[in-house]
Image (tube, grey):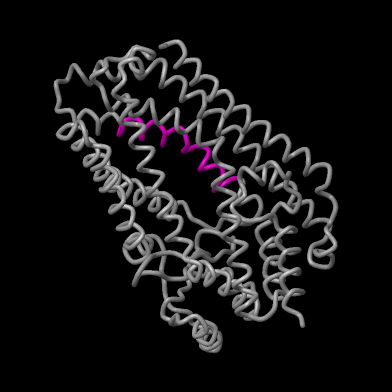
Amino acid sequence: MEQILVILFLVLFVGRALGRSVLQRLNIRHLRRYGQEIPPVFQGIIDESTQQKMVNYTIDNARLATKANLTDDICELAVLFLLLPILVEVLAGWQLHFIAQALIFFGLLAVIGGIISLPFDLYHTFGLEKKYGFSTITWRLWLMDLIKSIIISAILMGMLLSALFAFMHYLPQTWWLWTWLFFTLFEIFLLWIYPVVIAPLFNKYEPIQDQELKEQIGSLLAKVGLKAEGIYQVDEGKRSRHTNAYFTGIGKTKRIVLFDTLLASHTPAEILSVLAHEIGHWKKKHIWKQLLFMIAASLVVLFGVYNMINAPVLYHAFNLPAASLYAGLFLVSLYLSCLGFFLGPLGAMMMRRNERESDRVAVELTGTSEHMISALKRLAKDNLANLHPHPLYACFYYSHPPLLERIDALRLMAKKKEP
């Protein structure tokens, strides 16, 4: 049975590694074949030099992702088969409390993961993003962001893991249920405080400054019963020239956030169409639906983890003592991580469905799809988006429908609204 578990992990691990590699190669090959073609809807919007820049940006990002994935895979195997048995033995020899052992264990793994990813993050920010004119961040701001992220992550993960291991230690038969309840409350709490506590630590959020645009926004929001106080602009331009907008928060902290770069580069009609799309997420309750799905899924996962880490065969398969439940939790997380790659298309499909629903709401609110289409074209150009993704790659990784498909759908929506 031990050999079967090891073989199963290796099959999943190799399958994930090959799957990611094949998808990247398919996407690049597809782009090299069709990437020089400027789609008819983008004629006059982008020229040949911009199209080539889009192709090069996508390829460079893909190459960086491939190298990062390969490095992660090698380090993961090294940790699993070389470092893990030694680390567990050393921690057991320190005679610390179980919770302290577990926190040190996952803390060390987090440090290792951070060190491994750091060079790729640095190159992406100060190499690749600067090469294509996106990155505006200074070294000082980047360092401050890193320090803040480490502190916040340490606090939040420390709280979550401390509760988890306390339940495991003091309630060994029902810890999975108590962990699920705590995780649910913790997740709702994070969704509530993020817009008003965490996000402002990194950026300045303020109500829309353009009074004329604010009045237009107010009229749009009145159609769905929202107030303009919930619309903010954020100074993301101090880090990047990328443009975006998003919906965040729940209850009284819910808000729609527009990048200052988006406000500077788009027309008022385009901004309203983007805003209408974000309103669609609120109207369709997408955040709540995703939260409820995650809560239900986490209950199933935690019950499965409970049964798996109580099986001695799991520890024997990787030469670990059965008493190190935190190591068992790490082992199960590796299996779930590999399995998650193959389940990824289901999650991506649900998110793309949400985006289509929000697009329909945007068309209903604004009465036209032309401004949304215009905004998407500008977003594609400004962000050097890939206009020719391979369908299988998009199936795995795209949380939004591919641009050309999305524009076609918007045009069809507009035709259906015509008398």
**Residue plotted at (62% across, 49% down):** 398
Residue for point 40% across, 69% down: 254
Q: Residue at x 53, y 38 (%)?
A: 120
Q: Provide residue 157's location: percent of width, then percent of height.
A: 30, 44
> Is residue 292 highlighted in magenta?
no
Q: Quadrant of residue 342?
A: top right
Screen quadrant of the N terminus: top left
Q: Is residue 136 above or below residue 210?
A: above
Horizontally, residue 291 falls left or right of residue 167, namely right
Q: Is residue 108 magenta?
A: yes
Residue closer to the observer: 144 or 286 = 286
Magenta region's main secondary structure? helix
Quadrant including the C terminus: bottom right
Residue extent of the magenta highlight = 106-127
Residue 180: image x %, image y %? 29, 44
Please give left or right for residue 413 compared with residue 292 in the image. Answer: right
Q: Count the labels in the image.
A: 0
- Residue 332, above or below 201: above
Which one is in front, 272 or 232? Answer: 272
Residue 370 horizontal/vertical position (percent): 73, 75
Q: Which residue is pictured at 56% across the width and 54% down the height?
A: 351
Percent position (x, y) of residue 239? 51, 59
**As drawn, 343 above or below 7:** below
- Give the side of residue 300 with respect to residue 32, left or right: left
> 357 or 35, which is in the foreground?
357
